[in-house]
Amino acid sequence: MNRSYGDQCGVARSLDVIGERWALLIVRELLLGPKRFNDLLAGLSGASPNVISQRLRELTGSGVIRQRDLGPPARVRVYELTDWGRDLEPVILHLGQWGTRAPLPEGASSSLDSLLIALQATADPAVVKGRYELRIGTDVFTVDGTSGSVWMRRGTPDRPEATLTTDADTLHAVATGNRPLADAVDSGDLLLEGKPEGATGLIGLLQALMP
């Protein structure tokens, strides 16, 4: 059982549920869609399998996440957020923005999902205002800015205006300003396809984290 602050305040009661180490980062890793246990481990490389297993049990018991068995041909078990767990999305996005002013740990790394969530949190809806497809390695994501805000989910979008195809390392290097976008495009490491206005929106997304 999680330790409790024994405080009736909503903040304390929230921390009773998600305040244990790695708990909120598990929620972060599930924001864009369901994941298998091994996928969670890959995104949280600093955590041990035993700790992640314990947090998953706690979060499942609290009703923040649930398990689901995928039918054939996959036949695998995934973890996903419940509706209550998904209500944490604006909290995590705001924490992500707030935390950009904190010191960057030495040797820090980030998972693909955490990078995409950071892009979502900082993207300008006035620029990223269409529907786009991201193909990052074997993963496919929908980026949708048609409702006045930007959100991302795993899965293929319906009639995207533009598609970006690259690998996780190139995406990270370009999005963090460590590699010029033109260089990645010229080398073929990053491909932009679609309508010109759609490509403009995707470029705006890539530049969301840049100073």
Image: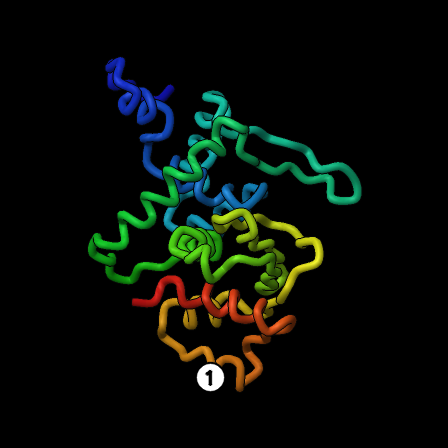
Across and down, in percent, residue 182 comes to 47, 82
Q: How many marks?
A: 1
- Residue lying at 38% horizontally and 41% vertically, measured from the top left: 92
Across and down, in percent, residue 176 comes to 37, 68
Q: Determine if residue 98 is in view.
A: yes
**SS assignment at label 1:** helix
Q: Is residue 101 above or below residue 84?
A: below
Mark 1 Cα shell of 10 Å, populated few (<14), some (14-19), many (≥20)? few
Considering the image in quadrants, where does the N terminus appear?
A: top left
**Between 165 and 90, which is closer to the camera in this rendering?**
90
Across and down, in percent, residue 164 comes to 58, 68
Q: Is residue 197 left or right of residue 9?
A: right
- Residue lying at 45% horizontally and 41% vertically, measured from the top left: 49
Amino acid at the residue labelled 1: Asp
Q: Is residue 207 above or below residue 159?
A: below
**Between 89 and 27, which is closer to the camera in this rendering?**
89
- Residue lying at 45% horizontally and 66% vertically, measured from the top left: 204
Q: Residue furthest bottom?
A: 186
Q: Is residue 6 above or below residue 196?
A: above
Q: Is residue 99 above or below residue 24?
A: below
- Residue lying at 56% horizontally and 35% vertically, measured from the top left: 80
Circle 1 is placed at which residue position? 183
Considering the image in quadrants, where does the C terminus appear?
A: bottom left
Across and down, in percent, residue 202 comes to 52, 66
Quadrant housing residue 24? top left
Color theme of the render: rainbow
Q: Determine if residue 111 is in view.
A: no
